Image (cartoon, grey):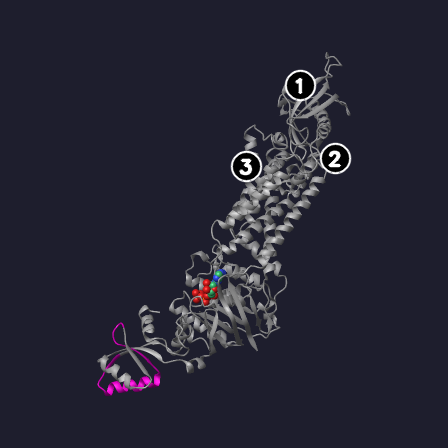
């Protein structure tokens, strides 16, 4: 059964077309990554799915029930948040959750304690929310979503603001929930963060779906990975790269070489360097295949699909630390 | 994040997929909880409780009286008058302030905290949340208003006493009767209080600006009080909620008239329904799409509202003469004369003189004239009552002229005051040697303007 089926969603804001006939379908139990750069329309799509924004066209079904705007019963069993979760700052985290549980008609102290514990806020639940850090609010947002015992979880940039441990816990939680059959749609512009959690991806760019499919399909279609390599003789390595099929190399701005190469080809290239007497001192992954694909599909330059992003661009991103 | 509890997986049709009943009740309860934990609301509640006591305590330590307010001169004589004076200020600006503080930010606070998306993604629909908030706001406004009323009655009775109240026809209402009427009067404030709440809600939703929502009902109430001062007609005045808050005046005549009260209730209902309809129309079609990029920030919204309100005020001011005049010489004369008569009897009894039941002064040709170009309408009047003094030695055929300066409101309520030549000083010493208010010095009265 489809947990979510959206078709032909269009949403315009005065001058911008935030969503341009977007189709999206999620089977029950899927974990879907909704990917796209800033302004791609991820948040707007989630707002439409939550009934917060009425689309100009298109329709949505949640668990085979049509979603209506501005109010709909179809949203039962659906939880999550859009943008950074916000709460009543003058109330404690626990009272905030109690209010939400009241609205849900599912009051129960035990549940609230459990939800707080799950997100690691057990000790801070009685503090006022205006004293919470960004990451703590994010955790409280997740707790608020869990209180609804959702069958479909819509999370907008769930790991934004979380510390590394928080990101890891978030991943575990998503996998655990998925293991219990909860369908999850999570948006992000940081593909590395969600790559390991998702079994399928939808990529948005300027309000349009530019790619949609499973993780395997993505890996199969993904272009070469990008690496940064330091070796004993850059000139010789560059020459050898020219002789080897499937290896593209350019001198990097920060010294060494930038490479675009598939994993199998990389092995034989490194062996070839060795036999030619060139020592490989360091080899680091700049972008995974999925990342390369993401950059390729969603970057604003009009490059044909599946073409690897310019190595120089990846190199620049690596320098910028993104 | 611990991974202890296990989530069951339900199929559609099971409880996880059906919205629980009574969304309005749940939204209401959540809203009540939010409101009662807000510091502003707690402060307002404290003020509602404390201000009547402070007022009554001040009256205890000083002799002045708010004579311009109906029943003002009686505040030292009966605790019920204290409550009525508090009621008059509550109606004029207290209730609008309470309505603004409670309801003016009840919707816009969700914008300020960014919590609409939180509330609207739970198991309450948009209309549940809307109705729940409305009901919670109305509960608090009415509750705080009644709290003020009960506090003022308690303060009056405890600090001044539960003496009989002089009614507007110059006779006495028993303490029980007075208490009942004062309480009923506080109840008549409920419909206009709800109307002010609806105005605050509308502004809160339309402007998404908490400050405007809080201040505007108060500003509107003041504007209405000013509008009630202009024009001689009654129709446009009756359309204002500001008139409904004084409709209780009619209850204090021996033969209470309910016309203005019923009109006030109807007008409050109309204001409420219109404001709520517009509010819901705005909220219903609203997109909760974050902070819109192109939305005019800052002064655009407030300026438009101010312009609209100014236009409405100008229109109503121009329409001030619309309809028949509620205040005429005949009505004033026929109301003041018997009151004067009764109050004279009351005065004589208080002074310990024997007045047989049914005794009357012989009054000749009382006249009332309005100062100003038009001979009818609210404003300053002079009424002259000719009294044939029964005192020994006076010529029976020689009437004494008693002139009263009368300021009359559009709704037929007036305050008449006369120089002490005939009627005596403001305070007099009664038969038991107590200093008491001279009932003839300031006469309050109300006649039906409809
Ligand atoms: N309320 C609004 N009014 C006008 N334009 C809007 C509004 N909300 C979003 N937009 C526009 O719609 C487009 C999509 O915005 P959206 O917030 O959905 O992007 P996003 O993918 O979530 O981006 P990010 O990664 O930065 O969160 C943007 O061009 C944005 O400017
Ligand atoms: Mg976003």
Q: Position of residue B333 (x, y in %)?
A: 72, 27
The region drawn magenta spans A253-281
On residue B255, which mark appears?
Answer: 2
Q: Position of residue A49 (x, y in %)?
A: 54, 68
Quadrant where the C terminus of chain B is found in the figure: top right
Count residues near mark 3 (Cα–Cα under 10 Å), then give few for <14, some for 14-19, many for 20+. Answer: some
Q: Is residue A270 left or right of residue B114?
A: left
Camera-side residue: A104 or A18? A18
Residue ID for mark 3: B54
Whichever of labels 2 and 1 marks the residue nearer the N terminus, that label is 2
Magenta stretch: includes residue B205: no
Q: Residue at x 35, y 83 (%)?
A: A262
On residue B422, which mark appears?
Answer: 1
Whichever of labels 3 and 2 marks the residue nearer the N terminus, that label is 3
Q: Which quadrant of the figure has residue B149?
A: top right
Q: Is residue A114 visible?
A: no
Q: Is residue B409 above or below residue A106?
A: above
Q: Residue at x 57, y 61 (%)?
A: A103
Of tags 3 and 1, the one toward the viewer is: 1
Q: Which quadrant of the figure has residue A198?
A: bottom left
Quadrant where the N terminus of chain B is found in the figure: bottom left
Judge if badges 3 and 2 mark residues of a common chain: yes
Q: Position of residue B156 (x, y in %)?
A: 61, 36
């Amino acid at each position: 059964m489809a947990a979510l089926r959206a078709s032909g969603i269009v949403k315009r804001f005065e001058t911008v077309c935030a969503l341009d006939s977007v189709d999206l379908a999620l089977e029950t139990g899927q974990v879907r990554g909704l990917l796209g750069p800033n302004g791609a329309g991820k948040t707007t799509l989630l707002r439409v799915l939550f009934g917060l924004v009425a689309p100009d066209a298109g329709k949505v079904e949640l668990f085979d029930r049509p979603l209506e705007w501005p109010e709909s019963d179809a949203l039962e069993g659906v939880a999550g948040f859009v943008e950074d979760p916000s709460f009543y700052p003058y109330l404690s985290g626990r009272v905030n959750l109690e209010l939400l549980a009241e609205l849900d008609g599912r009051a129960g102290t035990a549940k609230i304690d459990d939800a707080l514990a799950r997100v690691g806020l057990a000790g801070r639940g009685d503090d006022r929310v205006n004293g919470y850090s960004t990451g703590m609010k994010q955790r409280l947002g997740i707790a608020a979503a869990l209180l609804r015992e959702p069958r479909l979880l819509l999370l907008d940039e769930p790991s934004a603001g979380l510390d590394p441990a928080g990101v890891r816990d978030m991943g575990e939680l998503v996998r655990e929930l998925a293991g219990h059959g909860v369908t999850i749609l999570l948006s992000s512009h940081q593909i590395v963060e969600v790559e390991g959690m998702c079994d399928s991806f939808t990529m948005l760019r300027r309000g349009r779906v530019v790619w949609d499919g499973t993780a395997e399909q993505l890996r199969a279609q993904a272009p070469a990975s990008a690496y940064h390599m330091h070796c004993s003789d850059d000139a010789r390595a560059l020459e050898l790269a020219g002789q080897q099929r499937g290896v593209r190399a350019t001198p990097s701005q920060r010294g060494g070489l930038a490479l675009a190469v598939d994993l199998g080809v990389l092995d034989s290239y490194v062996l070839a360097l060795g036999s030619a007497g060139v020592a490989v001192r360091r080899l680091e992954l700049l972008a995974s295949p999925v990342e390369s694909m993401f950059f390729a599909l969603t970057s604003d330059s009009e490059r044909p699909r599946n073409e690897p992003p310019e190595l120089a661009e990846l190199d620049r991103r690596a320098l910028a630390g993104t | 994040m611990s991974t202890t509890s296990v989530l069951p997986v339900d199929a559609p049709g099971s409880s996880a997929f059906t919205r629980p009943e009574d969304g309005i009740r749940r939204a209401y309860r959540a809203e009540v909880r939010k409101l009662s934990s807000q510091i502003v609301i707690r402060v307002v509640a404290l003020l509602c409780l404390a201000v009547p006591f402070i007022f009554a305590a001040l009256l205890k330590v000083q002799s002045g009286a708010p004579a311009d307010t109906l029943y003002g001169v009686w505040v030292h004589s009966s605790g019920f008058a204290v409550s009525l004076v508090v009621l008059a200020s509550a109606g004029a600006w207290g209730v609008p302030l309470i309505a603004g503080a409670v309801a003016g930010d009840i919707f816009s606070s969700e914008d300020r905290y960014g919590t609409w998306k939180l509330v609207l993604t739970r198991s309450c629909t948009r209309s549940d949340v809307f109705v729940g908030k409305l009901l919670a706001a109305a509960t608090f406004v009415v509750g705080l208003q009644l709290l003020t009323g009960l506090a003022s009655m308690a303060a009056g009775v405890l600090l001044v006493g539960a003496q009989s109240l002089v009614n507007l026809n110059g006779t006495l209402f028993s303490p029980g009767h007075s208490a009942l009427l004062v309480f009923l009067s506080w109840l008549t404030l409920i419909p206009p209080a709800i109307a002010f709440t609806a105005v605050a809600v509308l502004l809160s939703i339309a402007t998404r600006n908490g400050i405007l929502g809080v201040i505007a009902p108060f500003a509107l109430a003041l504007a209405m009080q000013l509008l009630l001062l202009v024009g001689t007609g009654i129709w446009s005045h009756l359309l204002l909620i500001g008139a409904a808050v004084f409709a209780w005046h009619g209850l204090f005549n021996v033969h209470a008239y309910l016309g203005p009260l019923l009109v006030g209730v109807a007008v409050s209902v109309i204001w409420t329904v219109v404001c709520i309809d517009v509010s819901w129309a705005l909220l219903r079609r609203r997109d909760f799409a974050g902070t819109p990029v192109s939305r005019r920030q800052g002064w655009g919204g407030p300026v438009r509202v101010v312009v609209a309100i100014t236009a409405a005020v100008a229109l109503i001011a121009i329409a001030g003469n619309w309809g028949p005049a509620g205040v005429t010489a005949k009505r004033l004369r026929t109301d003041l004369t018997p009151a004067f008569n009764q109050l004279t009897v009351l005065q004589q009894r208080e002074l310990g003189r024997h007045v047989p039941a049914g005794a009357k002064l012989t009054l000749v040709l009382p006249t009332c004239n309005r100062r100003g170009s038009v001979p009818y309408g609210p404003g300053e009047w002079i009424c002259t009552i000719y009294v044939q003094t029964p005192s020994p030695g006076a010529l029976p055929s020689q009437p004494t002229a008693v002139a009263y300066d009368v300021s009359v409101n559009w709704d037929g309520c007036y305050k008449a005051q006369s120089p002490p030549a005939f009627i005596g000083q403001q305070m007099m010493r009664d038969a038991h040697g107590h200093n008491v208010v001279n009932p003839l010095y300031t006469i309050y009265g109300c006649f039906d303007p409809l």
